[in-house]
Amino acid sequence: MQFFYSGLTSGSIYALVAIGFNIIYNTTGLINFAQGEFVVLGGMLMYTTLTILGLPVSVAFLVTFIIMFIVGVVFEKFFLRYVKLKTETNLIAITIALAVIMRGIAMVIWGRDSLAVPPYIEDKTISVIGGSMNSQSILVIIVCFFVAIILSSFFKYTKYGKAFRACYDDQTAATICGINVNMIRMLSFAIASLLGALAGAIIAPITFVTYTDGIMAGLKGFAAAIIGGLGSFWGGLFGGFALGVIEGFFAFVLPSGFKDAFAFIILLLILFIKPTGLFGKKKAVRV
Amino acid sequence: MLKVTSLSVNYGFVNAIRNVSVHIKKGEFVALIGSNGAGKTTLLNSIMGLVPKKDGEIIFKETDISKNPPHSRISYGISLVPEGRRIFPNMTVMENVEMGGYSKKRSEVVSKMDEIFHFFPILQERRTQLAGMLSGGEQQMLAIARALISSPDLLLMDEPSMGLAPLVVKEVYEKLSMLKNMGLTIFLVEQNAMAALKYADRGYVIENGRIIMQGKSDELISDNEIKRAYLGKEYKEKWER
């Protein structure tokens, strides 16, 4: 059972990253390969605000979120919107370039070492059925579910959330309705950036944060999104947890060095067997 | 109410419409007829701002709206029912209608919603269903409802008869003429010339991106050139017999 619990923790992070992928994919049709870099920046900013500046935890989170919101906005507004030839391949390539740039900047600012972020709540071990869990890990899982519920009700019940879904269905029709599609695209990047930062911030006390973490976080989150079905909100959540738990299981029965490989073996299997993912829906076609 | 003056739109190097001028007075029901590719949809889309104009003016209620971004034009009081309906298939009927009122205050939308559902009882029945599950005619009604929720002064309609059974077409047009009687100004674009001219007050004929003829509907219907070009030799349509 122990692997199950540790899987849930890393699964929460994958899930948050996967949801970030899905939000951007739904409104723009793009895969944002810098999603993992958002995670790193979130962790790094928490390090700066908490450890270096010594701000209280709530203020540190606030500052991190505000900066990451701006990063998301700038990302879309300056680097994607003004591209001359807006094919999806071009834009996706730009997200890869930006990922590399962000990784480089993170290295210059924060250096190559792993940075430790102090825990947000008291660090203790809690025994659960069939194993034990760290209080930090429980916090991660709770935050993940909390965010998922808030986001899904945002998309389901609020006017702006519905506007996101309208853009996903038909951008022209959304424009006709008076929805500023460019604004929605920008906000989807901002939300994805926030989600990544949140993931990075809550996991940082457990795993520490290094400037190269973004590669794995991004790829695993992408795998989770594919497993759940690209574009599906609950699919992303489920895919994240499924990936985390399966990974934990293989790390348990096999040398843990193979752990990362399994995430991608699962990714390949899904792509071979069910390319739409477990919960993937085809985009509804106009009759 | 709407005055389009010498409007030209290009797609790349191709002239889609050239020097088109159209005017619509308050309370009128005007039809623009023409064959495939004549530029009908382009004209409507450029009024709504979905395609950029090359030249000309689009004056709506004394303001030139041709430079405003497309999403802001609905707030001037123009609504478009786009070609092929373009409802949001993965959202419920109710959510679709709500989205039409995106630019309005919540309270206005809620009060207008009852009115709309009263006008389209079928949508009331299906309000919690996904819009993609509706039949073509119901989707057309939904698209009209979505356009009406913002209480527009001018309704632009693009090919309401497309892909619909003749009986349903008739139903749609009857709704439109009810709306006209309620004081709505309607500008409609249609390939199905007979249906459009039967209900409209006035008509324009567009060919190869130019307006080639205009006049009262009954004049256009009896014009031999129109008969030949758009109605066919045996121009009575099946649904009329």
Image (cartoon, rainbow, N blue to C red):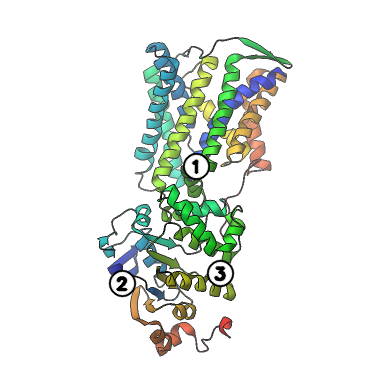
Type of the residue with mark 1: Thr
Q: Where the N terminus of chain B falls, by quadrant?
A: bottom left
Judge the density around disc 2: few (<14), some (14-19), many (≥20) Cα neighbours within 10 Å. some
Residue B90: percent from the left, percent from the top? Answer: 57, 51
Chain label for disc 1: A
Q: How crowded is mark 3: few (under 14 residues within 10 Å), some or many (20 or more)?
A: few
Residue B120 vs residue B151: left or right? right
Q: Mark 3 points at which residue?
A: B163
First of labels 2, 3 by sequence position: 2
The location of residue B112, given as percent across then percent down, is 46, 56
Residue at image position (46%, 23%) is A40
What is the spatial separation of the Cα atoms under label 3 and label 1, in whole angstroms? 33 Å
Q: How crowded is mark 1: few (under 14 residues within 10 Å), some or many (20 or more)?
A: few
Q: In this view, does A150 lie to the left or right of B58?
A: right
Q: Mark 2 points at which residue?
A: B23
- A280, above or below B211, in the image: above
Quadrant in which the C terminus of chain B is drawn: bottom right
Chain of the residue that carries numbered disc 2 in the rendered image: B
Give the residue pinned by disc 1: A158
> For the residue marked with disc 2, what is the amino acid?
His
Q: Are marks 3 and 1 in contact (CB under 8 Å)?
A: no
The subunit letter for the residue under badge 3 reads B
Task: Indicate whether A104 appears above or below B181.
Answer: above
The one nearer the camera, A106 or B146, is B146
Q: What element carries label 2?
A: strand
Q: What residue type is labelled 3?
A: Gly
Do the residues marked 2 and 3 share a common chain? yes
Which residue is at the front of the view, B135 or B121?
B121
Image depth: mark 1 or mark 2 in front: 1
Mark in the foreground, 3 or 1: 1
Give the vertical position of A201 relative to B187 (above or below): above
